Image (spheres, grey):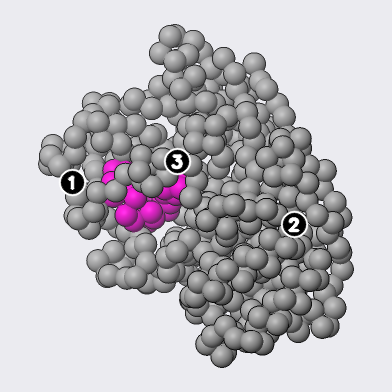
Amino acid sequence: MFLAAVFSVSALIHANPSEAEGTTILPSYVIEEFGHPPPIPSGPLSEDLEQAVRVAFIDSFVQGGWGIDQRAALEQIAQSEDPRLAWLISDMMRFTWQMSFDRDLAEAAVRLLELDLQTRSRQHDITNHLMAWDVPAFPGYLEFKRSIYTGFVPGWDEILVEGDIDWRLVSWGGVLIDDRPYDATREPCNCIPAADNPDVSSADEATWLDDDDIVFGIEINGEARAYPRRIMEVREMVNDTLGGRDLGIPYCTLCGAAQAYFTDELPAGVERPILRTSGLLIRSNKVMYDIVTHSVFDTFLGHAVTGPLADIGLELEQASVVTTDWGSWRRQYPETTVLVEDLALGRDFDFRNNRDADGPIFPIGDVDPRLPVHEDVIGIVTASGTPIAFQRSAAMAALLGGAEITVEDVHLELSAGGIRAVDADGADLGSHQAFWFAWSQFHPETELWSP
């Protein structure tokens, strides 16, 4: 059976978010957790207020400091009673270089949003309120945000452009853009380094892996390959070829989601996208882009949302990724290959059980309350376009108990210790595992399967 409900305050991707106006009717759970938002005006900023924004947020880069003029301008902003300006304050707080600067910004945002914050994670809490309340941006917001972001990382100048993406929700993840050319796996960078055409070994040669190590398994046209989580937590992006097909494989550590997109068999004249990590996040999901065209993709959905690939409406097809343990994957696919150990660059992270154990470390706003934020789900979109999430633990128990799980064209089956979705003929439907908060945010109208 299904429990269908719409809990999300707003979809993540929509046209012209900076022109959003009006009042959103908030779900009761949002009011309970975040309270009521303050009154929000509409229309453009006054000339005086726009000038104050330029002095406070743009001139500080030119002058290289936070001085009297900036404080005066920020005070004018704080007195404006326009909560929309708190988005820029949140943006700037990701890059503040002085404690006094950060404090001044936080106090201005608190006044604009009428908050009483008692925590140290002020930027996190301010942004969560902005997201949960769906506070609109003022017209021209992206121009200012772009100036702030490219003032710190020039490589973003071709990334932050108008498109079908809600730039309000995009923030810096604390790392620089990976703008290395294709097949640069071995080149060092001050970024999260994607692996292109990674070296692999046989299962027998992978003595460094224990049977209970987590891997992300992919099988294409009879060829299987394991992508160890230990490596993916370092690389977060792999451009590979498997079973005669080109793939882009992002792993969002924050969302617990490894996905595989086919990057071949594209429209005539379209060069294979080479996917990279931008260093940006959208509600705690990595923002990936193509280094060939600088088109930005919605990582979770595979849609191009800016640039030439968005102009042609490119949507990448997904292949299934099975999250499982190495022992189970190897037993089902004894001829599997696996990425070699040195791709981990000597690191051995376990973000899920350490850094992220107490919940998302970046703002995500409101979360559909039907499941805990870090509950694992298997997500799939049916042939009719309905997104459905299957709680992994419940689905696993049902399948192990001999139950059949079928919804429309979707059939869940056990696969190498994990779960994947197939159609009635056993053909792959491109499912993957993720945390509930991520799936429900990117599919705000998702249905939740119940055994």
Type of amino acid under label 2: Glu
Q: Residue at x 55, y 70 (%)?
A: 102
Q: Tag on residue 40? A: none
Taking depth in this image into account, of 320 and 280 the one nearest to the observer is 280
Q: Which mark is residue 358?
A: 3
Q: Say which label, 1 or 2, has the lower sequence index.
A: 2
Most extreme residue toward the top, as rendered? 402
Compared to residue 275, the image places residue 301 above or below, namely above
Q: Would you call the spot at circle 1 few (<14 residues within 10 Å), some (14-19), or many (20 or more)?
A: some
The residue labelled by disc 1 is 201
Q: Residue at x 78, y 51 (%)?
A: 37
Q: Is residue 158 above or below residue 210?
A: below
Residue type beneath disc 3: Asp
Query: Helix, strand or loop at disc 1?
Result: strand
Q: Would residue 146 be found to the left or right of residue 205 on screen?
A: right
User: Marks 1 and 2, how far apart in space?
Assistant: 57 Å
Badge 2: residue crowd in 10 Å (few <14, some 14–19, many ≥20): some
Quarter of the image containing the N terminus? top right
* Residue type of the residue flagged with mark 1: Ser
Q: Confirm whether the magenta stretch covers residue 144.
A: no
Q: Position of residue 106 (x, y in %)?
A: 62, 65
For the residue carrying disc 3, how many other residues have a C-alpha within 10 Å: few (<14), some (14-19), or many (20+)?
few
- Measure the C-alpha gap from mark 2 to mark 3: 27 Å
Q: Which residues are magenta?
A: 228-256
Residue marked by disc 2: 114
Write down the quadrant of residue 39 in the picture.
Answer: bottom right
Q: CA distance from mark 1 to mark 3?
A: 35 Å
Ranked by sequence position, the earlier of labels 2 and 3 is 2
Give residue 218's position: percent from left, percent from top.
36, 39
